[in-house]
Amino acid sequence: MSNLITLPGLIDCHVHFREPGFEHKATMKSEAASARAGGVLTACEMPNTSPPCVTVNALRQKIAIADTITDCDIHFFFGITEASHMEEFQTAWNDEGLRRRLCGVKLYLDHSTGNQKVDGGIVEDIFKRCSELGAPLVAHCEDAEINAEAAKMFAKQTDVSLHSLMRPSASEATAIEYAINLAKKHGTPFHIAHLSTAQGIDLVRTAKAEGVTVTCEVAPHHLFLSIHDYDRLGPLGKMNPPLRPLDDVEALWKGIEDGTVDCIATDHAPHTLEEKTSPKNPLDAPSGVPGVETMLPLLLTKLSPDQIKMLCYENPNRIFSLNAPSEPRITIDLDEEWVIHARDLHSKCDWTPYEGMTVRGRVVTIT
Ligand code: DOR
Ligand code: ZN
């Protein structure tokens, strides 16, 4: 028996495909194949590549590679760490050809993989300029000072679960509050990346009720994993923002139910297994987990196809003006249950934090 449904090709509005610069971790070709196998036919890629995507030239270089990829339509975020990058972004945004492949600006309010923390002195100007340009501004919301203080408290420790205390909930909440205030003041189309805490959800819910132009995404790893998975995952469970307690996980699901959460996006961040597991101190392992191929089957265990269509197609398509086709392009057999094994997945990194989990729904055809 089969129980087939169709959906438009899904959109993952937050991925790291690593190219150029980190092809040993992943390439656009390898990760586009992984995306496609998971029903994701449009992806928005982040700027922490090498060279970083903070100049028109670097953007052109990425677009040239993406033009050779057929499995997935790849769009790009533009990073800003210093004032000159804003000028570069403006040039790119005003170029019709480049704009079609540009999703907006990505700001890191604290360092993460790639060390792209923005100069704090220019953040407000970026909110103002993005508002004037009508360009979406996405932020990784963690507070650098709070994280630095917390990290000091756990210096020289080696228990990887401490990562969640070294980047505490209060850090995310403080950064979200700060950024929402700037969006409110300047009317910026502002989107919060990988929101992971109950406080964060509450802040967005309140801001939306006040009419602030804010949207947010949550990542599957913050929905399906928690601090209780560190024992099983070790350094494979390390990402930024980190895994959270179950109260936070529950609040994210509530945020999905009541429409506070606009998108589910994977923050697909492949690192090699060697990079993740070889550091003597697991707290030195790089942060990030793959997820683009497992998002849909995980979500089908909890959400209806209509909810998934809203969170992984309609909302990201509108927020980032992606013009992704609305016709049904993927057929899914809802009755098929299967067990996730990294050996069956296509990402170059060859591991998954969801190893052994039973999921639902197999993508059977893609047109
Ligand atoms: O866990 C993460 N990994 N968080 C980020 O902010 C960056 C990402 C990466 O690029 O590895
Ligand atoms: Zn990311």
Image (cartoon, rainbow, N blue to C red):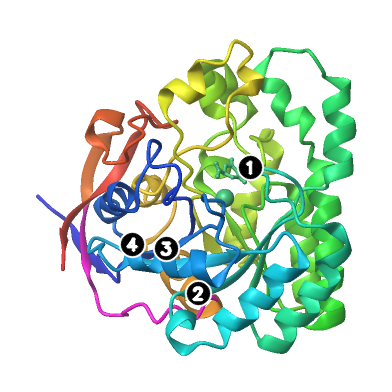
Q: Which residues are magenta?
A: 320-333
Query: Sequence-wise, which precedes: disc 1 or disc 3?
Result: 3
Q: Residues within 10 Å of mark 2 (few under 14, many from 20)?
A: many
Query: Label 2's element?
Result: strand
Three-letter amino acid code of the residue under disc 3: Lys
Q: Which residue is mark 4?
A: 65
Residue 5 x, y percent position in the rendering: 22, 64
Residue at coordinates 49% horizontally, 18% vertically from top-left?
A: 277
Three-letter amino acid code of the residue under disc 1: Val
Q: Which residue is mark 1?
A: 249
Q: Residues within 10 Å of mark 4 (few under 14, many from 20)?
A: some
The mark lying in front, picked from 1 and 2, is: 2
Residue 344 x, y percent position in the rendering: 22, 34
Magenta span includes 124: no
Residue furthest left in the image? 1
For residue 88, side relative to residue 357 (left or right): right
Q: Quadrant of the C terminus?
A: bottom left
Foreground of the two, 258 or 213: 213
The mark lying in front, picked from 2 and 4, is: 4
Is residue 306 shown to the viewer in this render? no
Three-letter amino acid code of the residue under disc 2: Leu
Q: Which residue is mark 2?
A: 102
Query: Label 1's element?
Result: helix
- Whether the residues at callouts 4 and 3 have beta carbons within 8 Å, the answer is yes
Residue 62's mark?
A: 3
